[in-house]
Amino acid sequence: MRLKELCSYLDSKIPLAFQESYDNSGLQIGLPEMEITSAMITLDVTEEIIEEALSKKCDIIISHHPLIFNSIKSISGKTYTEKILHKAIKHDIAIYSAHTNLDIYNCSVSRKMAEKLTLEKVRVLSPIKNRMLKLITYIPESHLENVREALFEAGAGVVGNYDHCGFISSGTGSFRGGENSNPYAGKKGKIHFEKEIRFETILFSHLKDKVIRKLLDAHPYEEVAYDIYALENENINIGLGCIGEFKDKIVEEDFLNLISKVFDAKGVRYSNITGRQIKKVALCGGSGASLISKAIFSGADAFISADIKYHNFFDADDRILIVDIGHFESEKFSTEILYDLIIKKFPKFAVRFSETNTNPINYL
């Protein structure tokens, strides 16, 4: 298939609009029209990863961490990133990354951590706000289903695990066409009353233009009446980190051993033992120190993340057990999320996991 087909699918399932402002997710290298036959999934892109892709005849690398973060003015090989870029371009290997958008959308990376620990009642720890819009429009009864389906096809009407969500109410609309009008119903210069449906639905703000285009295309009126309102609702399925519960309580020492085993974490760092048993656990893949206060406020007994600094451990203050399992270890299962997404849509496309350990940190 063509590269643009895979990228378009991934962009739709893990919207780039949800990445942090500093991030650079999406297609890093590659011409959209190029043909791809095999993909390799990895956490990081290194020179060894390029070599592995070549040896396995993979023409696209899909990573969690983007190769290109900062601006690049030349590709002369003077930096490690430039060396990798040069090798990838030379061998016509495409690179696609899904980073903070994968972290935030459905809190996928943190949710995968919770899944590995078999936590239940998992929900977002820090939901995002101000990303939802409400659309209200008025549709003649005869065209309700056509317009509804067009809006849903464009991505409107999604609420958590539900889609095709909307509300309808009946009423009567009135209008009078001017001299240059071409009314769908009624006659120019005369007031017309039409049985209409008031239809309401919601959408993510990044879909606004697409949804409005579909509305205008599907609606029979020459001038389409619609309202858009910004919503302040928190989206319970989108945000950073997550929180869940063990079926049964577990003592702290056993909890730490479990974490070390599940994530193969060889250098677990943790705050003072509190003496309480662990039931409710907050998690954040990658650098999650900023969520410590939210974890405490949520009533979590423990918080698992990475890149926690010395002074952050004082914030535990015997109220929570803070555990740093390492950046690589906390995000290593992001590759499984990407694999499952691709195979679900393209079951016959060759996708494989990298066998190269890209963790730059070693433990004595």
Image (tube, rainbow, N blue to C red):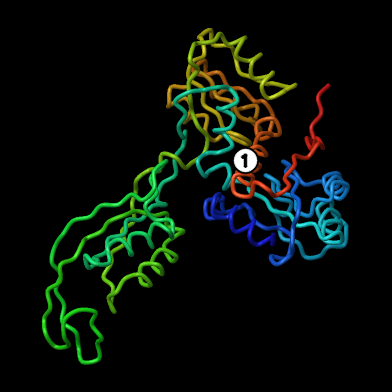
Q: Nearer the viewer, residue 255 or 213?
A: 213
Viewport quadrant of the N terminus: bottom right
**In which image quadrant can residue 24 be found?**
bottom right
Q: Which residue is mark 1?
A: 340
Residue drawn at (33%, 64%), measured in percent from left and top? 146
Q: Nearer the viewer, residue 90 or 186?
A: 186
**In which image quadrant can residue 177 be found?**
bottom left
**How many discs mark residues in the rendered view?**
1
> Where does residue 31 sit, x and y in percent of width and height?
73, 65
Q: Residues within 10 Å of mark 1 (few under 14, many from 20)?
A: few
> Where does residue 263 sit, x and y in percent of width and height?
68, 25
**In which image quadrant can residue 353 be found?**
top right
Q: Is residue 118 above or below residue 307?
A: above
> Where does residue 141 sit, x and y in percent of width and height?
21, 65
Q: Is residue 44 left or right of residue 270?
A: right
Residue drawn at (70%, 49%), measured in percent from left and top? 349
